[in-house]
Amino acid sequence: MIGSPRYIAALDVGTKTVGIARCAVGTRLAHPQHTLRRRGLKLDVPALCDIFASWGRVETVVVGLPYELDGTEGRSAKLARQVGEAVAARGFAVDYQDERFSTVEASRRLHAGGMDSRRQKHVIDQAAAAVILEDWLGRQDPAPAAGSPL
């Protein structure tokens, strides 16, 4: 689609919900978008792909991997990989990002913005997806250090 917007999406995959965020290609600011209630891989992946299609063109889908504190992949990381692999099978480029502490950071940001813990419940997963995406963006093209020549 010529001229259609291009996005990078991020997913925070949990057992009950999937948080979804996006940013426009070429920007570094991720925006929380949606929280999808999980209904099983066979129903979740088409729903995710429908959301991506409604945006225009999604160039990459970043899936958060909730590694254990020792760096190993536990049950939750395996679930996230299953979702990532299923999305990749639908033709999307998929990458993975360590998401340890993304929910903690998302909660901190929401609280700093004046949202109490009770009200965070409905948006925390999509806010965590935005943290995952911003972390991934920083890993792709780290900003130059202050005082460094461009």
Image: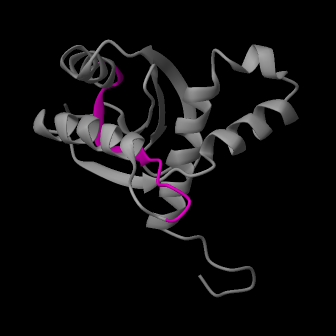
Horizontal and vertical percent position of residue 148: 67, 87
Whole-percent x, y for residue 90 in the image: 13, 32
- Seen at 32% across and 12% down, the residue is 39
Specify the quadrant of the image occupied by residue 4: top left
Numbered range of the magenta stretch: 54-70
Residue 57 in the magenta stretch? The answer is yes
Picture quadrant where residue 123 is located: top right
Query: Foreground residue, 135 or 141?
Result: 135
Query: In the shown orientation, is residue 77 left or right of residue 132?
Result: left
Above-or-below relation of 89 to 38: below
Task: Locate residue 97, reporting x and y percent.
Answer: 43, 54
Q: Is residue 53 magenta?
A: no
**Side of 97 where 44 appears, left or right:** left
Q: Is residue 30 visible?
A: no
- 72 vs 116, left or right, is left
| Image spot of residue 126 (x, y percent) | 55, 28
